[in-house]
Image: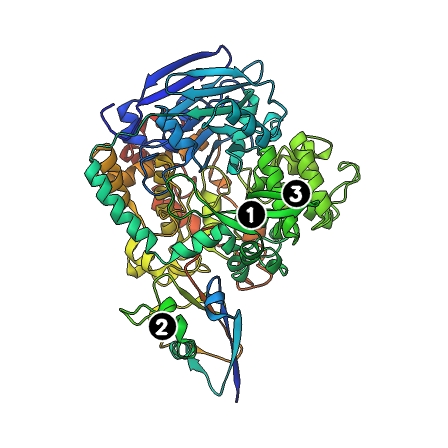
Amino acid sequence: MLFFGYAGKIIKINLSDGCLTKESLDESMALKYLGGSGFGTKFLWNLTDKKTEPFNEDNPLIISVGPLTGTGFQGANRTSIISKSPLTGVYGDSSAGGFFGPELKYAGYDCILIQGKSKKPVYLYIGNNEIKLYDAREIWNKGVFETEKFLKKKHPHSRVASIGIGGENRVRFASIMFGLHRAAGRTGMGAVMGSKKLKAIVVRGHGEVKVKYPDKVGNILKKINSRLLNNPFSETITRYGTTILVELMNEIGRFPTLNFQSGVFSRVNLIDGDRIIKEFKMKDRACFGCRYGCKNYINYLWNSKKVFSDHPEYETISSFGGRVGNSDLKTIFYLNCLCDDFGLDTISTGGVIAFCMELEQRGLLDRSLTGGKVFKWGNQDLLIEIVKDIAHRKNFGDKMAEGTLKLSRLLGKETEKYAMHVKGLDIPAQDGRAQKSMGLAHATSTRGADHLKASAFLDEVGFESAISERFGIRYLPEMADRLSPKYKAKMVKECEDFSSIADSLTVCKTSGYLYPPIYYFNDVVEMLNSVTGMNISESELRRIGERIFNLQRAYNIREGLTSADDNLPERFTKEKAPDGIPKGHVVELKEMLKEYYQERGWDEISGYIKKQKLKELNLDFVKSEI
Amino acid sequence: MEINIKVKYFGQLKNSFGIKEKVYKLNKEILLGSLLRNIIEENPSVKNTLIDTNTGMIKEFYSVMINGRRVESKLFNKKYISDGDEVLIVPPVGGG
């Protein structure tokens, strides 16, 4: 491998026959796709086609890290997982923080390509001198917590990525858990892993990441760390993590309530960050190489027993709080732990439950289907029971485990308008009527409704200086105004490209890259060149981000998606926000989308990528397939 | 005529100010900039938290909203606050 920073090796394993090979990483892959989800996107393009079924053995599960992973650069700790999604049927990916990614690199690998299906449950061990499949029958049918304990005992000091009962049972929104509480939650990557009968991946590495210019790396680290720690965001992030958002998002009318019927939850003070920090926080926790440490370790009493865990993130508080009309904080804590142990995405789990609760409210849920269960808003016992049923695919939980879109199709056309998803992925905790950039970003995200594919956070409370530096003062004040659709297409496009870089370097987007808006393309190119010696320009780095995003788009076009799928439920485009600050607003999607396609160089009607754009991005090879 | 303006503090600013919100009773409309200066004078201990000593302006990434709409810092001395308005002062938060 010409470039530093990479381990230079890929593991390819076929679980059907146990065949295992190690291959050198192609330098041109590194130059064109960087790593992480960039590698995953290209491998997925190559290895699948329209006929590939997500649960079939030919659907690969790709696990990948990037060139900065394990170097000590801020937030360079994430691991990307890519596959065709069983929830959406199109491009799927997810990532998680923690310690697994750096450990994989220290073990000597940048990427694991898993194909085939094992006949019996197995887990994969990866060390510097050993890669081996072990029998996992002893831990099959066990939760993530027990699995982690078992594997850590057997392989001391290792890092574990595992699935729970949800993944084993192919719940279409099952997550892969990294350690006990870091979830690669979205798009059902855990279900793909379960379909392959792969219970866990265990890594232990003793190697190092070699960098091209150690002195330069040291100097850049000093400089960027100082910018990070002196930034006024630092204190809040460390103290609260994402829990701080609950109160703020409710204040601006963006906190999904009762399946997005409103953006204001009247009992928000019972579940907000202040309460969590004051009453339950024990200490800060951090992922590998993060100077922020946005995680909080908490303890609480549940059925007279003391429970220790990480705090639920903003998304989870929304999912099991306002979204389902529940204001009992301890129930949210418990549901968060249940989902971690079962390996379920909290966003989609809360999403499908909220969907059923709204159907109940409207008299559209037949109780003969639910086994007599009444999906009443805020019913805490029901929430717990249903999460268990989903994980075990028991009773009506079996139907819910198919995900909101498939369930709505089963329940009838009149239910579809209450299914809050885009491209089959449940909408996360942003009401686009209260923040127009998020409405657009949900529609354009390549993995379905998502806030992180773009991470368009600049207009949340309006970061004027970052907008001015990144786009120019002429875009103010409209770009900073979350209720104005103006210039949001430009912002979302640029943020999507930068997020594609972050996901490919596998750095944490919310550790100073997309939020807080501290580092940008110019900083990242400096980091990347000092580590790898690639010596690429900032404009080339931007082109790489654009290439990765466009290849994901091309993948979805090959699967049959069109501009009609860049859509939102009509609740957001036709129903006016009923209360709070965005009262009266809808998402002006059509207008923003037109502008967005122009920004992207895509056909303004069909949303297809124009030939000229493909050529510009060295993606000519997709032409014959889309 | 007396007017009422509610000022709400967000996040750790609630700790800095020791209160969540305060209603100001004034005898006429007031410029946002003047209100902020009054608040600082009333709470000198929060000056370093809120104000950039180099520019004398509110620190970068802090946001001030009137009725939920952000006000550009350059408009602080042009924007009047009226009876019943809510002013929200938000420290640097976001990201979800």
Tell me the SS state at disc 2.
Answer: helix
Categorize mark 3 by other alpha carbons within 10 Å: few (<14), some (14-19), many (20+).
Answer: many
Q: Is residue A45 above or below residue A281?
A: above
Q: Which of the labelled discs sits on residue B75, or is there none?
A: 2
Marks 1/3 same chain: yes
The answer to whether the residues at label 2 and label 1 have Cβ atoms under 8 Å apart is no
Q: Which of the labelled discs sits on residue A168, or is there none?
A: none
Q: Which residue is mark 1?
A: A298
Side of A205 where A321 appears, left or right? right
Q: Quadrant of the C terminus of chain A?
A: top left
Subunit that carries the residue with mark 2: B
Q: Quadrant of residue A263 in the image?
A: bottom right
Side of A269 where A30 appears, left or right? left
Which residue lies most toward the bottom here? B1
Categorize mark 1 by other alpha carbons within 10 Å: few (<14), some (14-19), many (20+).
Answer: many
Distance of mark 2 from mark 1, alpha carbons?
A: 42 Å
Residue A218, x across and y down, in percent: 23, 41
Residue A543, x across and y down, in percent: 28, 38
Residue type beneath disc 1: Ile
The answer to whether the residues at label 2 and label 3 have Cβ atoms under 8 Å apart is no
Residue A385, x across and y down, in percent: 71, 39
Residue type beneath disc 3: Ile
Task: Give the mark nearer the N terminus: 1 vs 3.
Answer: 1
| Nearer-the-camera pick, A137 or B5 | A137
Residue A179, x across and y down, in percent: 50, 33
Q: Which residue is mark 3?
A: A353
| Nearer-the-camera pick, A300 or A364 | A300
Marks 2/3 same chain: no
